[in-house]
Image (spheres, rainbow, N blue to C red):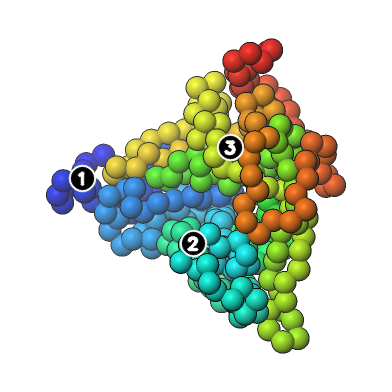
Amino acid sequence: MTRHETGPGRTVVTRRQLADALAALGVRPGGVAIVHSSLRAFGFVVGGAQAVYEALREAVGPDGTLVMPAFTPQLCHPATWRAADLARTDLSAAAAAMPVFDPLRTPVSRTMGVLPELLRALPGSLRSPHPQVSFVAEGPRAREITRSHPDAYRLSSQSPLGELWRLDATVLMLGTGWDKCTALHLAEYAVAYPGRRAGLWPLPGPGPAGTRWHEVPELLVWEGDFDRVGAEYEACGGPLARTAVGTAVCRAVPLRPLVDFAAGWLPGHRDLRRGVAPPGWREVVDADGPLPLPRLVLDRGPQPRPQPAPGVPA
């Protein structure tokens, strides 16, 4: 690919280059893709998020479906706030003043990047109903992906992630690292590992006089070792395509074998027994048994084998 330098470290990337990169990753019409993206990682994208969206839409075609996390952490209970300068805030008043989640109007958090907000605002896109970790989808499979999203166990197989598993979706990471790979949370719900915990987590909802908060059972998820999971998946030869466009590294990986690998990796490599629950959690207990939800049917054929941790028998 030709690079046009605009200055030290800046590379101009066009829609055509993005489309070529998606083709190199094996993205084909008719598929279902969950997309994580960072425009800044590319350098300078001509047309910004619109150009990335148009390249993605061209790649999957009219019969393909695009999915993106549309999370809204700005709607978390004030008891979860960590900023020291908010210490004197009246948490009760702040909690009552929290806006109620509206799938049609509540913007995606800026921390998710600009592309998910663009997708959310498009006519015809659909959004799952979870007030904090919704997903937005556009395409023929959007309704079945977003129609159900229980409040409890929000990133389990009962969420849109479970639908993506059933649809054999592809994970696209466009300039993002493995730490942004939301699908890996499926493995956390599917298998136990040392220090796995669950507790009660507050969610906002409509009440007779403003926002009403209610608690739901939830798993304490953690992305701290997702980069290691991804690196070892690649090292073990898991199905994956990789290319570069501009200054961004882009990956396409089938969701099922990736989650299978992570589910085999976590019990022997992750140990959170010395971890402390973040603010806002209540009644946190060990969750070393199966969660009260149907578990994913793992081991769908030969998968790359995770390497055992030092001192752990293979």
Residue at 33% in and 60% down? 48
Taking 309 as reference, is 84 above or below it?
below
Distance from Cα at disc 1 to Cα at disc 3:
31 Å
Residue beneath label 3, please? 254
Taking 93 as reference, is 11 above or below it?
above
Distance from Cα at disc 1 to Cα at disc 2:
33 Å
Residue at 70% in and 64% down? 202
Callout 1: few (<14), some (14-19), or many (20+) C-alpha neighbours within 10 Å? few
The kind of residue tagged 1 is Gly
Residue beneath label 2, please? 83
Q: Is residue 26 visible?
A: no
- 291 and 284: which one is in front? 284
Residue beneath label 1, please? 9
Instruction: Give the image location of residue 43, x and y in percent.
Output: 27, 50
From the image, which quarter does the N terminus lie in? top left
Instruction: Give the residue furthest to the bottom.
Output: 209
Instruction: Give the residue furthest to the front.
Output: 88
Q: Is residue 45 visible?
A: yes
Q: Mark 2: which secondary structure?
A: loop
Taking 155 as reference, is 147 above or below it?
below
Callout 2: few (<14), some (14-19), or many (20+) C-alpha neighbours within 10 Å? few
- 58 and 260: which one is in front? 260
